[in-house]
Amino acid sequence: MNDLPLLRVRNLRKSFLSKSGIFKRRRITVYAVDGIDLDIYKGKTYALVGESGCGKSTLARLIMRLVEPTGGSISYRGKNLLSVSAKEMSAIRKSMQIIFQNPYASLDPRMSVREALAEPLKAHGLWNEDEESEKELLHLLGLVGLDEEALDRYPHQFSGGQRQRICIARALALRPEFLVCDEPLSALDLSIQAQILNLLMELQERFGFTYLFITHDLSVVRHIADRVFVMLLGKIVEAGGAEEIFDSPHHPYTHLLLSAVPVLDPRARGRSRLLPVGEIPSPLEIPPGCRFQTRCPFVKDLCKVEEPLLDGNVHAVACHFPLNQKRRTASKRNE
Amino acid sequence: MAGKGRNCVPRALRQKVRAGLWQETISRFGENSMAMVGFYVIAAVAIVAIFAPLISFHDPYEINLRQRLLLPSGAHILGTDAFGRDMLSRIIYGARISLLVGLIPSFISIGIGSAVGVTSGYLGGKIDFILMRVADIVIAFPSLLLAMVIMYTLGAGLSNIFIALSFVGWAEAARVVRSQVLSLREQGFVEAAKAMGVRRRAIMARHIFPNCLPSLVVLFTLKVPEFILAEASLSFLGVGAQPPVPSWGLLVSQGKEFIFSAPWVVAFPGGAIFLVALAFNFVGDGLREALDPYLKR
């Protein structure tokens, strides 16, 4: 691991103003992303997990500069993305791409595959109307396992999995080094999920991509991720190597997420599962103290007063009373 | 079950064919018989308008006071008007004016309206606010009154009718386009284009505007009969086409004195207006249906 991270995020925040009341006089600031630090090194796969609405996708959009952050900094190869010129940003865009959750929405229904794949090339002045460019399109299709026939067809003529392949091909057109995958599998069937996942892994092996994989599917994470970030209501509550997190989660929330993963083993039936208590707090009214207090089975008085900070270097956790025991059921499952 | 299976097979086969989006839409349109009837009526009127000198037996301007207000007969199939002019020929020549009055202001108003709508919807903020308030003012005005004011100011005449109707019509088109843009702007593919580094203007031109086209096509077919009727109203009120030009509205206007003594003088041009307006409405409905299933998919 060399010392300079590819992407460094510091204290990144994004708030939305929620207005309510008849005259919209009651204004509440909602923090979708509330002070996040990330270091992403080249060639690794990072997973960002968390429940719906915890700000995962907002974080992805902030990193891709699709939404303006409220505060904090994002730097890519040492360049601060929030202050670079438009020209430099355009160059950086070439090296970081995003694959979206919904392949049904992220392709323009009025554009043929040819036009869709050519678009990023055109936007960066890499497109000439010649044989060479045409070959490039075929090459891209080949990478994702589609053939020439696809070029003149329209998105509605493809299945979800094929569309996601087209989206991936489009993201590869600019030869990026860093790919954000924002739940790329969640809109697909289970069997197709495996295909797309394998495709992404093959491409990583071939081109050395760095992935930030956003998902709520924990069973996938263990297979692909080197490092895992667990996000809860806009904050990272646990970060560590994939093995460590899966084998000994320190934060009760992580433990809860893991024990909610179904296990494909009849012998594991009746395993001791950690069950949540209480309700998810509304993001509009996050209680003082720990964000997990309303649902934590181990909640103590301190948790209701003081917010725990992310503590630790390799395996960091934001909890006053981190768990320590190994999880037994999951670790023996596949070996 | 059987019915479902039967429908599934041709669709699967059709998808193998490399059909463009518009071809698909056209084939769906062709399956709609009402819409096709409307289409044939419009096509027939267009042909008649283009070849008017070849089709009509009489000069539409030829006055023959001895043959005033004749009943429909072999010599004058639709009878004659108060000056003894052949009604059929006048209606045939009138088709030229009515079609032009329907088509040209529709093009202009939708062109202006979509430019305003796309800019307003995509950029938002102050520009949006100002443009939409201007559009509100135009819409809030009774459109016929506004058109009359413009006609009084500019003077009667065909080209001024185009100006007046375009001015009245753009605001509605702008509203329709803007509302489309507001939803398109949030679509995944627009965000994807931004992430790829596509410039704002290119996103508007390549993604936003083409996706508005289906509703613009439908809007167009609704605008055409509206403008044909508006011209008829303006002419009827005396600020549109000027006699002896045989515009359909003017024919009705001039025939109104004889509505009881010689009803055909009013009925035939009125019927022509009715027929063309209805035909455009059918086509509009058909297009909406033909374009819709694809949009929903």
Image: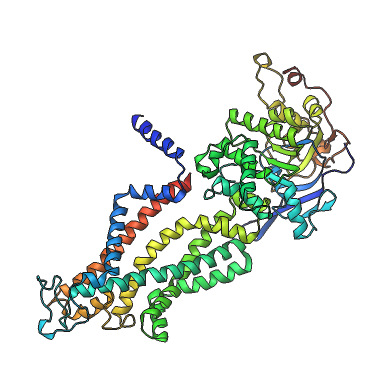
Residue at the (26%, 67%) spot, across then down: B48
Kindly identify the residue that appears in the image at 68 percent across and 39 percent down: A280
Residue extending furthest front? Answer: A131
**Residue B93 x/y as whole percent:** 26, 74
Colouring method of the image: rainbow
> Residue B14 at what x, y percent from top left?
42, 39
- Nearest to the observer: residue A165 or residue B154: A165
Q: How many marks?
A: 0
In the rendered view, would you say A163 is above or below B138?
above
Q: In the displayed structure, would residue A152 be above or below residue A22?
A: above
Q: Residue at x 42, y 82 (%)?
A: B150
Q: Is residue B63 left or right of residue A114?
A: left
Q: Is residue B50 visible?
A: yes
A149 in relation to A275, above or below: below
Q: In which quarter of the view is residue B43 placed? A: bottom left
Give the position of the N terminus of chain B as an image quadrant: top left
With respect to residue B291, does B79 lie above or below? below
Which residue is found at the position 38% from the left and 31% from the top? B5
